[in-house]
Amino acid sequence: MIFFSDFDGTLTTDGELTRDFFEILDHIKKHDKELIIVSGRSLSWGHFLLTHFPLNTCIMEGGGVIVHRDHRGEIVEEPLVGQSELDRLTKFTNGLKGKFPHVPLSADSFGRLSDRAIEFHLMDESWIDEVMKYMDQEKINYSKSNVHINFWCGEISKYLGVKHFLEKYRPELKQSDCWFFGDAPNDQSMFELFHNSVGVSNIKHCLDRLDHKPRIILDGDENIGPKGVLNHMKSLQKI
Ligand SMILES: [Mg+2]
């Protein structure tokens, strides 16, 4: 069994890694399971997570890149879109910087491979509209979160990243033997297409904005973020 999980708001609480996260890691180790973080954060964050916690694989940039340790223990990056799409993204980003020099790319854009992000909370509404119009014209994919506009070329989603990982690295496992935890709109591809999906209770703040909801929605303060993840893991252990 593999537990796939979003990071921000699902394994963290109000932007902090708490004791609950470390309890999850202990639980995983004790029961000989695997945890794979599936996050919109950058590839460089994936390196950080692999080098600081007992994890073997992270799927980062919203499903755009897998980063894992190979049989020698070396960290290997595997982009899930082709080089031509990565080149198109680099070219577009350079063009964007020339056309909108006042639009700030997120600091972590330097550690990104398959997408980039704009810090739009620092921008005027009119700039945001202009930038999105330009992305539409250039056929660039993008999504808007609370703080960022992420943009990329090619087909990328958390679900495609997880599907690719299972088919290539764990073909003996069925999706139905695995679980996914999430808390926000950028987890929707998993909520839509992955059977065992769980929303931690803080997902209630955005439930009405979701086109696709998780199959199981946890409730109550005792199931916020990592507390909900751990409680659900423990309940499965009892079956
Ligand atoms: Mg999240």
Image: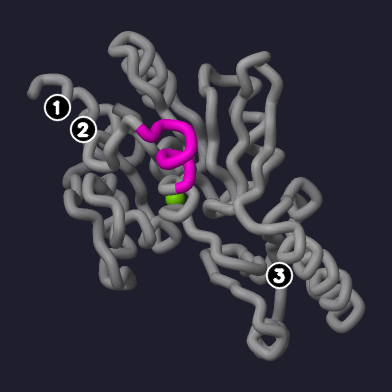
Where does label 3 land, which residue? 122
Q: Which mark is residue 232?
A: 2
Q: Which amino acid does label 3 sit on?
A: Leu
Which quadrant of the figure has residue 129? bottom right
- Between 107 and 239, the one nearer to me in the picture: 239
Residue 168 on the magenta span: yes
**201 left or right of 184 in image:** left
- Between 226 and 112, the one nearer to me in the picture: 112
Query: At 35% from the left edge and 54% from the top edge, which residue is drawn?
Result: 190
**183 left or right of 55 in image:** left
Q: How far across and down, in percent of the image, does residue 194 sit?
A: 29, 52
- Between 177 and 104, the one nearer to me in the picture: 177
Render colour scheme: one colour
Where does label 1 land, which residue? 235
Q: Mainly helix, strand or loop, the magenta region?
A: helix
Query: At 71% from the left edge and 61% from the top edge, which residue is drawn?
Result: 116
Give neighbour class at mark 2: few <14, some 14-19, many 20+ (Cα, 10 Å): some
